Image (cartoon, rainbow, N blue to C red):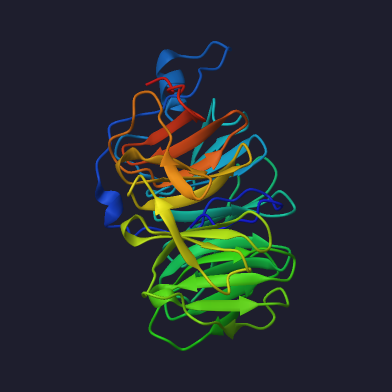
Amino acid sequence: MNSQYSGAPLRPKKSTISLAVFAVVGAVLLNSCAESTEKPAASVAAESKTVERYEVVQTLSANGNTVVGGTQTGVVTVSTDGGNSWSRKQVSNNASFIDSAFCPDGSAAMLDVYNTVWTSSGDFKDWLPSKFDKPSSPVAIECHSSGLWVVGSGSHLINSTDQGKTWRVVSFDEDAQFTALAFTSDTHGIAFGEFGMLAFTEDAGLTWQRGEPIAGDFYTYDTLFTDTSTGYASGLAGQVLKTTDGGTSWTRIENTTEAPLYRLFMHAGVPHGVGANGTVARLDGQQWVAVGYEKPVLSFLGAAVSGSQSIVVGGPGGLLRTVQSFNSSQADPS
């Protein structure tokens, strides 16, 4: 799930929708550009299929023009040109990627629902798995100067400073899950959970303290901070909240789309979100408004990042598509 600080390497997202939601069937298949060198037609066709129709793109992360995506069936897709062309790798037949993050050193990490973090550096062709015991149901991953962080069930936060070889466990011993994590500076971080649960750190995660919960048992899908004080949190039933004091207090702002926004991210200097019914939204003043685009997607959008000139979105049915930022889009070949 997509939480990010706009001054840090771009990372969407950061909360994860339950796998039951991802059972929605889509109908878009991305074929990447064919290579110019001659190859047998069958070989070229196989290589050009970045995702299959039965796959669900559950997470996308970007670092400059490099976009990394993960699917429900253990496939990693990589684009080095802002989503125009893609390569594919079946990392594992027993993995299901639900969240991802780029790290300050340019490496990337994929969160596998089966208690595993997969890390990669360089060209993102080789991915190394690292298992952990808690949380038993992971939800979101973040990569910060203090290392890798995973949050999830049992009010657990875990941290690794050695690329997943060892993990330190922080728990508040409550029957509730953390659903998103945002570091807004080198030292300040916020963990968001069920029932409005909040936890804060002021020392880069060495210690955590419970904060006053968000009113109304707010359930956070994703968060986005535009600076250390100003941030947004999306939740159930299309709710969007705003803070201007670093997460201590939150107020509701209007979401005119009325759609739940599953991922929040920055694009062209403006907060954006994607969600149910193919919704693409952006912040306009003190409200969220719909962004029109050609050939709208009818199913949900569960992943998105800002590409070099456009927004890269993902979802069910093997959906990977570049959408122009306001009123037009460039559909990927299918």
Q: Quadrant of residue 161?
A: bottom right
Tell me, yes or no, if residue 136 can be seen here: no
- Farthest front residue in view: 285
Residue at image coords 58%, 70%: 247
| Residue 129 rendering spot, x and y as whole percentages | 55, 60
Q: Quadrant of the C terminus?
A: top left
Residue at image coords 47%, 58%: 222
Residue at image coords 72%, 68%: 146
Residue at image coords 73%, 77%: 203
| Residue 292 rendering spot, x and y as whole percentages | 40, 30
Q: Quadrant of residue 320?
A: top left
Tell me, yes or no, if residue 67 can be seen here: yes
* Nearest to the observer: residue 140 or residue 203: 203
Q: How many marks?
A: 0
* Nearest to the observer: residue 324 or residue 119: 324
* Nearest to the observer: residue 131 or residue 17: 17
265 vs 118: above or below: above
Q: Is residue 327 left or right of residue 209?
A: left
Q: Quadrant of residue 246?
A: bottom right
34 vs 200: above or below: above
| Residue 48 rendering spot, x and y as whole percentages | 46, 24
| Residue 103 rendering spot, x and y as whole percentages | 68, 55
Q: Is residue 330 left or right of residue 266?
A: left
